[in-house]
Structures are given as structure tokens and as C-alpha cells.
Amino acid sequence: MASQSSQSGAIIAGINVTPLVDIMLVLLIIFLVTARLAVVPPKGLPLDLPKSASAETVQLVFAIALYADGKATVNGQLLKSDEDLLPMARLEHQAHPEVRAVVQADGKVLHERVVHAIDLLSQAGITQIAFGVTLTSASTPPAGPSGQ
């Protein structure tokens, strides 16, 4: 049992550290869970970086942005239609086979359009595809399918 009884009726002078250890473990778990949420993504700043001959190679990114009004851009260049993405992606993949595509789609863009863009990238041979997102506050859960 956790309690000690003394037959002589004397006062127990020892400190029970079990509740202190319990509280410290709970605080440690809370810290570990929330430490990941406290990381702020670095913001891009215009910098004049020094040159180095021994630096690692930079990952090549093929950025596709799909807007709610129907416009689309590739690396900042406006596309006339979504079908213009395929030849541009093929050229990029031929020039740089290790290129990675990042698809940034507005929340109001139809799922069909995003999947079509991914399909065009796959046809061009680009298999490393990521999605660009904006981080939100951890206290605000995303809305469910019913808009709750």
C-alpha cells in the first residue's frame, strides 16, 4: 500500500515524492507534444549568400500554382491552359531528371483539377511531387467534411 502506518502513533516525517514525479512526467509529456508545434517555419529573406565550391547541390523545384479563378502558373510564369503544363514539365524533367514538383492549389480549386495536374506531372516523368501548404494555428482544428 502507499500509506505507511506506525504502530507507535508517531508522525511520519518522510516526504512522499510520488505525486511530484507524476506531475513532472505529465509536464514532460506536455512539453514534448507542444515543442513540435512551437517551431516557426523560416521566412525567406532576400540574401546575398557567399559562394562555395564545396556546397551541397540545391534541390530543383518545379512549382505549380493553381488559383481559384482558373489561372495557373509554373515557376511564376502564367499558363494559357492547364494542358501547357505537360510540355513544360517534360522539358524540365529532361533537363533535370531529379526535379521535384511542388503543387500549390487554392483551397477552392476543384480536386479534379489538382489530380489532373498531378497526372500531367506523372506523364512527364516527374515522380517526386509535394503539396505546398500554409501552416495554421494548432488550436484551430480543420473543418470536417460537414463543415463543423
Image: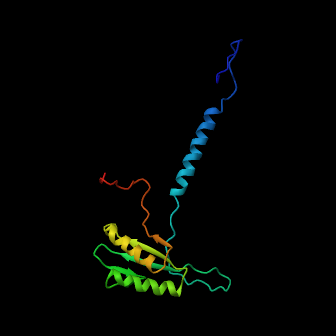
Q: Quadrant of residue 63?
A: bottom left
Q: Quadrant of residue 120?
A: bottom left
Q: Is residue 25 above or below residue 116?
A: above
Outermost residue, top side: 8
Q: Quadrant of residue 88?
A: bottom left
Q: Quadrant of the N terminus?
A: top right
Figure coloring: rainbow
Where residue 108 sits in the image (x, y, percent)? Answer: 31, 67
Image side of residue 76 versus residue 45, left or right:
left
Q: How many marks?
A: 0
Outermost residue, front side: 123
Outermost residue, left side: 69
Image side of residue 26 versus residue 132, left or right:
right
Relative depth, front residue between 102 and 127: 127
Residue at (63% x, 86% y) in the render: 51
Residue at (39% x, 53% y) in the render: 141
Where residue 48 sits in the image (x, y, percent)? Answer: 56, 84
Residue at (33% x, 74% y) in the render: 67
Q: Is residue 30 above or below residue 112?
A: above
Residue at (69% x, 24% y) in the render: 13
Where residue 148 sits in the image (x, y, percent)? Answer: 31, 51
Relative depth, front residue between 9 and 143: 143
Image side of residue 16 versus residue 98, left or right:
right
Where residue 29 sits in the image (x, y, percent)? Answer: 57, 46
